[in-house]
Amino acid sequence: MHRRLLIALGSVAALSVLGSAQTATKIPRMPDGKPDLQGMYDLAMLTPVERPNGLPAVLTDEQAAKLEKQAIAAQQAGSLPIAGDRSAPPKGGDGSVGPAGNVGGYNSFWIDRGSHYTSVDGQKRSSILIDPPDGRVPSLTPDARQRQASRVALVRLQSEATESTDPGLEAAGAYDDPERRPLGERCILGFGSTSGPPILPNYFYNNLHQIVQTQDSVMILTEMVHDARIVRLNAQHAPPHVRKWLGDSVGHWEGDTLLVETTNFTDKTRFRGATENLKVTERFTRVDANTLEYRFTIDDPKTWDKPWTGEYTWPITHDHLYEYACHEGNYAMGNILRGARLRESEDTKNKSKQQ
Amino acid sequence: MRTKLSSFLAGIGLVAVASMPAVAHHAFGGEFDPNKPVLLKGKIITIEWVNPHAWIHLEIPKADGTTECQYTPNAKCEEWMVEGGTPNTLLRRGITKESLAKGTEIVVDGYQTRDHSLSRANGRNVTFPDGRKLFLGSSGTGAPTDGADPADAGRGRGRGRGGL
């Protein structure tokens, strides 16, 4: 009897809290009154992580419209026909830089970069980063720079490979072993922190994320590379010796915001050079039926002197998320490693000829 | 010892390159050879609709080809594979592996894999023989719309086309 009374009183209290929250904002809610974060979100957008030089933190509607128009024009230019009777590209490479690696990558019809600037509190933002106020990631600590230098130098020292003058190739040793290749290429995590945390757009393609929620946990499924991160609610972190690619995420509700703290990263995850002691704090707030606001704070004193924070909105989409299944039919990794082995055997032949 | 030290210093100099953020699934430079440009004209045999990269298989008529051509009667062919991007983007626009009929003629320019024993290349530009890009510029393929084609009304990115 006593127990029933308590439950009844608890329900009344819960309903009154729920009632006041509902009058403040009209957002989808779960049967228990908590905000319903569930849905499919498309994170493709033009707002970069860091603010480009010369841009204000908040773009005027005219500035945003102009930049958006330029991006669409560039996308359309990539769709224009070219000469059907063209010849092969130039020998020695086409001069393309970055991942296109002097061989030109592939057609733009595979790519979906997004076409809008993110709007937070009605403001069109020029960068995801809001703190530091200049919108730039703080510089790495001397310790972090030393770590990176040592890692690269160690790979180089351990390698028998010779340095190549080919601009499309990475440093000697980068192809010695599949485990030397980047996590994205190895189909373990998405590139550019798509899997997170923090979850960032990759400004290229496959930016869909799906949230599924229960009373005890929230699951965030990332299209690329097929990672499902489970946030355990009102739980303790795993013991320190348990390390995970995506870290260990626990969360709780602060009003209508889901606050998620992630620690226990592996020493190979290395978000922007961070250590395994990185702590990422994320805040998920459903602001209306079609929008979720996402904010994150990065804290790793051995990598950055002070924490830094970013935020952007996740618009709901009615598109489908497709399985990424990165290993099946993945010829690229084999082609890359086979190419490196052939270079090695050619080097050996050349050396023996010289002797 | 001296070699090791100079290697160590060279390694430090390469940090800036190694820490550059990647913006594609993999770096193409390690896979394809800039000194082996190719121009391929042939007909589509099949498309492997897989991640991280779709692969278009095409047959190219060649006097010393090792297989019978499927789409050119009484001729010998050589098979090539051309690397593209993620199929997910195209699927969302309603394009499937059925969108492009087998036997369709295409022109590809790119670079051959660093292993020259493989007949594989990146699809730097993949077009129809008249230079139109594959999957774009045609109402039948679910390409992004620019409003120029009245047949595009009510279609386009974000709406999907069903029947996938």
Image (cartoon, helix red, strand yellow):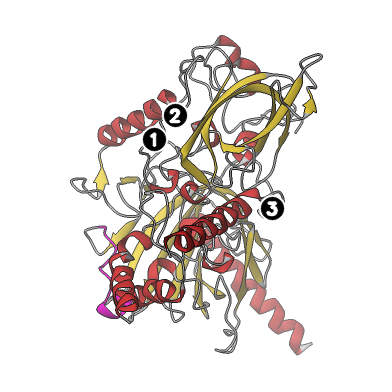
Would residue B102 be seen by someone viewing this image from the given angle? no
Please name the amino acid that badge 3 sits on.
Answer: Ala
| Alpha-carbon span between mark 3 and mark 1 | 31 Å
Q: Nearer the viewer, residue B64 or A198?
A: B64
**Chain containing the residue with disc 1:** A
Q: Residue at 46% of width from left, 70% of height from top? A: A160
| Mark in the foreground, 3 or 1 | 1
> Mark 1 = which residue?
A94
Q: Position of residue B91 (x, y in %)?
A: 66, 35
Q: Residues within 10 Å of mark 2 (few under 14, many from 20)?
A: many
| Alpha-carbon span between mark 2 and mark 1 | 7 Å
- Of labels 2 and 3, earlier in sequence is 2
* Same-subunit check for callouts 2 and 1: yes
Please name the amino acid that badge 1 sits on.
Answer: Asp
> Mark 3 = which residue?
A325
Q: Residue at 48% of width from left, 63% of height from top? A: A352
Q: Name the main secondary structure of what is drawn in magenta.
A: loop
* Disc marking residue A18: none
Q: Position of residue B150 (x, y in %)?
A: 56, 10
Query: Is disc 3 placed on a helix, strand or loop?
Result: loop
Segment tinted magenta in the rendering: A135-145
**Chain containing the residue with disc 3:** A
A255 displayed left or right of A134: right
- Of labels 3 and 1, earlier in sequence is 1
A321 is higher (above) or lower (below) than A309: above
B52 displayed left or right of A53: right
> Mark 2 = which residue?
A89
Labels 2 & 1 near each other (Cβ < 8 A): yes
